[in-house]
Amino acid sequence: MTPPEPRGTSGYAEVAPALLALRLPFDEVHAPILHLMPTQPSRILDVGAGPGHDSATFAGMGHQVVAVEPTEALRAGAMQLYAGLPITWLNDRLPHLDQLRARAEQPFDFILLSGVWMHLDPAERRVGLPRLAALLADGGVLAISLRHGPAPPGRIMYEVTPDETIALAAQSGLTPVVNLATGSLQPVNRAAGVTWTRLAFVRAEPQAQANT
């Protein structure tokens, strides 16, 4: 039986049509971490993929993409919008990612959580970070964006800090390589005082670990 959608997904079904229609420039949204994204065909996991715009961009680059999205309206809309692209869609959710883990996937070279982490409460984040780290290949990158400021009406967001996230990642053997505060690209969010922190972590390769 599929578990109920987590609290953090509240409000997204109602705005799914708007999110499916809104596509911000990929290079602008992800500018702080573009240099860490694979340039050769790789395995990419997009967790909380929402309307699928990032997954579609990765698939268009030739990557093998698995997109996880628990909100049915978003997942179904994205599957229809990007039906021509080779994206594997999963109805799964943080913090446990049970369905993804049950598939015994090979490790991913790049894992993206864009606008997701603040929807998990602190206890969920303590469970979720090790699960994500366990899915990452040696030398792979985990990229997480943290939203700060008021939540949109109808949505649930929890306070989250870079320090907390970096400490959780360190417990799972991940090293921070990006920690950058940015503004919001959307004028309505800027006016509301919304800011972001872009974080990226690397899992050291075995040889590098042995030399430290």
Image (cartoon, rainbow, N blue to C red):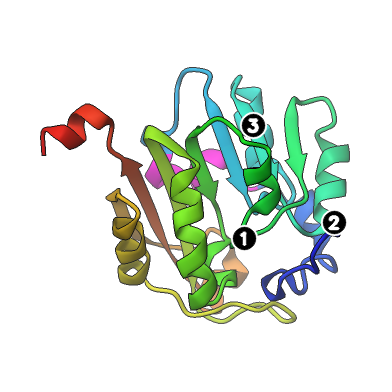
Image coordinates of residue 2 in percent, x first then y, are 83, 59
Is there a contact, CB below 8 Å, between mark 1 and mark 2? no
Q: Residue at x 62, y 36 (%)?
A: 104
Left or right, 82 with reference to 137? right
Residue 62 belongs to the span the image colors magenta = no
Label 2 sits on a secondary structure element that is: helix
Of the residues under marks 1 and 2, which one precedes in the sequence?
2
Label 2 neighbour load within 10 Å: few <14, some 14-19, many 20+: some
Label 1 sits on a secondary structure element that is: loop
According to the picture, the residue beneath numbered tag 2 turns out to be 72
Mainly helix, strand or loop, the magenta region? helix
Image coordinates of residue 149 in percent, x first then y, are 50, 79
Magenta span: 24-33
Quadrant for the N terminus in the image? bottom right
Label 1 neighbour load within 10 Å: few <14, some 14-19, many 20+: many
Tag 2: residue type? Glu
Q: Which mark is residue 65?
A: 3
Name above or below for residue 111 compared with residue 41: below
Label 3 sits on a secondary structure element that is: strand
Residue 30 belongs to the span the image colors magenta = yes
Mark 3 or 1: in front is 1
Image coordinates of residue 67 in percent, x first then y, are 68, 42
How far apart marks 3 and 1 lie (CA) works out to: 18 Å
Image coordinates of residue 141 in percent, x first then y, are 40, 40
How far apart marks 3 and 2 lie (CA) works out to: 19 Å
Tag 1: residue type? Leu
Q: Residue at x 74, y 49 (%)?
A: 51
Of the residues under marks 3 and 2, which one precedes in the sequence?
3
According to the picture, the residue beneath numbered tag 1 turns out to be 94
Instruction: Classify residue 62 by image quadrant.
Output: top right
